Image (cartoon, rainbow, N blue to C red):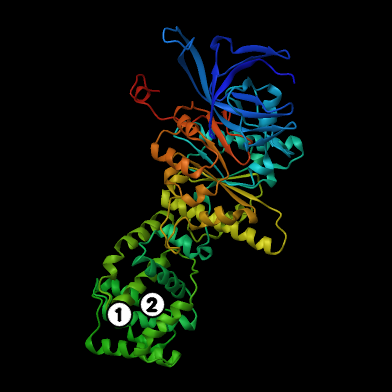
Amino acid sequence: MMKNKSIGIITKVFFNKIVVEAPSPSDIQHNYKGDLYTLEGLNDYITIYKDQKNKYIYQITGLYEQEKPMLSVEESKFERNAYFEAIPVGEIYHDQFEYGLSIFPIIGEDVYLTTRDDIQKILTSKNNTLPISFGKLTTHEYIPEFPVDSLFTNHFAILGNTGSGKSTTVRKILNELLNLKDRNIDPNEMNFVIFDVHNEYTVFNEQYLTKVDLNEISIPLNTLKLEDWINLVQPATRVQLPILMNGLKMASILESDNESSKWLKAYCALELYNNQQTDAVAKRTKIISLVSGISDEEVQSSVEEYDSRFGNFTQQNETRFRQAIKSYIKRVHGLDYHECEGKVQETLETANQGFKKLEKLKDGINMVILLEEAKGNTQVKANCETLMTRIDSIILNYSSNLLDNNENKISKFNKIIEYKKALTVFDCSSLESTDLLFFSGYLSRDILESQKSIRKERNLNKMFNIILDEAHQYIKEGNDDAKSNSTIIFNNIAKEGRKFGVFIAVASQRPSELSKTVLSQCNNFILHRIRNNLDLDQLRKSIPYISDSQVFRLSFLKTGVALLVGDSFTVPMEMHIDEEDLGEISETVTPSVLWSYPKN
């Protein structure tokens, strides 16, 4: 059995580590088969020979010196010996590396530096038919390759503090994927969907890139589901959520112009007149709007005397108005007025939530609030003040762009979500966190439902990887109520997306704030520098592949260096991510630059 030179012997053995004594710390360097080997220190690999063909592989996690008596007598002089601790990595068995150990070395066995051939066996994945690389080991001049088939058929997370190199890592990975065109791969079949919060992912060749300006597209409102509206409006669960749910249906009814909706508009008009004690002129405007589409001469003539300046009737005309509405409802729908309340509830239960104009949502919710007040719920309007404020803000900010009922913008949006290029980058830099949750959730749900539909037809010929930048801002831990859990779509993709070819990659600087469900379903992790104790503790709980010493090490990683752990990496490895001309690392503006003279 041909070995290189021993660097020490094992003095202690535990399940999670060994301690090795190196009698001559200044002599841990030698030549083996023409290669010069030097102990690199932390993260270096060491080997213990089990027999001629089998070897234990460990990785160094600690180095220290300790005095040791030269003889076993009390007057003996002391010498200083080097010791290092190492954690188990795996076993080379008949020239094949297997992660993990089932049996362990014993005290007194010799320890050797791992050869370059063995390092290659350790770091080379099995069945790596389509490999990519995006960096080299920090301890060796070795560039590992990773299997595309494994890396992008699992959810993964890129985590690290601001400025640690997360965005550079993502851009590097995407660039390496695009370079696969040289290996007979069509990049435009890749379908990466990126929610770009800081405008950092538009540096790629336009042949493979669709850059989306949110001011140039519109989402068709009638395609939004309840969970999309919840993410957009953010209602309080107990009071506001039921109002929102009925308000969506009422908006659909009010926008429609069929006979079944007209009696309801007539009923709401009279309820509004009877119960709402607001500005009389504004109340008149709402009532006229409700009855304007009713083709009934008696109703229309009854409102002709509704004074536009003062918003009132004479007593005689008021009686006439009330009777006209009641007669119309009885004639067209066969309902007495006192029966209407129950019929309204039945109609709301069967109505859909589709409408085209954002302003209708406010009208629908106002009408639902009115009906609640008519039933004696005097606090409903006060309880929904924040809900209405949020809706006013949405109308102000998005009725002329992202949620505009503009056919050209909607057509452009529908063309974009055909995803014809490798990278579809949505510029989300203008969105607030709650709006980013809505937008990313809507598109992610649309992708998942589309893939489910294709799967039913047994024709699943696409896969999608969704990159969620700054995910901690919007994919947060939700509550237990399934209806109001704002991250439910991402939790669903994390749990079941794999079988439908939908995968997510979360990039975040605060893993402790991420949805625990999403984080727990990630199989691969690229970990940059993280210093917050809450975040480090969350990584300990969420990643089964990582040791305490590796978690501790994360606080001291240099910018651009990352720890890779997970199913697609044969062993945990510390790597320096290659920095190419793929855009600048995000930097904080400094006073020394802003305050200096002269100004350009």
Alpha carbons under labels 1 and 2: distance apart: 20 Å
Of mark 1 and mark 2, the one earlier in the sequence is 2
- Answer with left or right where residue 431 lies relative to residue 114: left
Q: Residue at x 67, y 45 (%)?
A: 190
Residue designated by label 1 = 375
Quarter that holds the C terminus: top left
In this rendered view, identify the residue nearer to me: 367 or 345. 345
- Are the residues tagged 1 and 2 within 8 Å (C-beta)? no
Q: Residue at x 57, y 27 (%)?
A: 59
Disc nearest the viewer among 1 and 2:
1
Residue found at the very far right of the displayed protein: 184
Residue 161 on image: x %, y %:
44, 34
Numbered-mark total: 2
Secondary structure state at the residue bearing disc 2: helix
Residue 476 on image: x %, y %:
43, 50
In this rendered view, identify the residue nearer to me: 552 or 15. 15
Residue 393 on image: x %, y %:
36, 56
In this rendered view, identify the residue nearer to me: 299 or 245. 245
Q: Residues within 10 Å of mark 2 (few under 14, many from 20)?
A: some
Residue designated by label 2 = 290
In this rendered view, identify the residue nearer to me: 368 or 67. 67
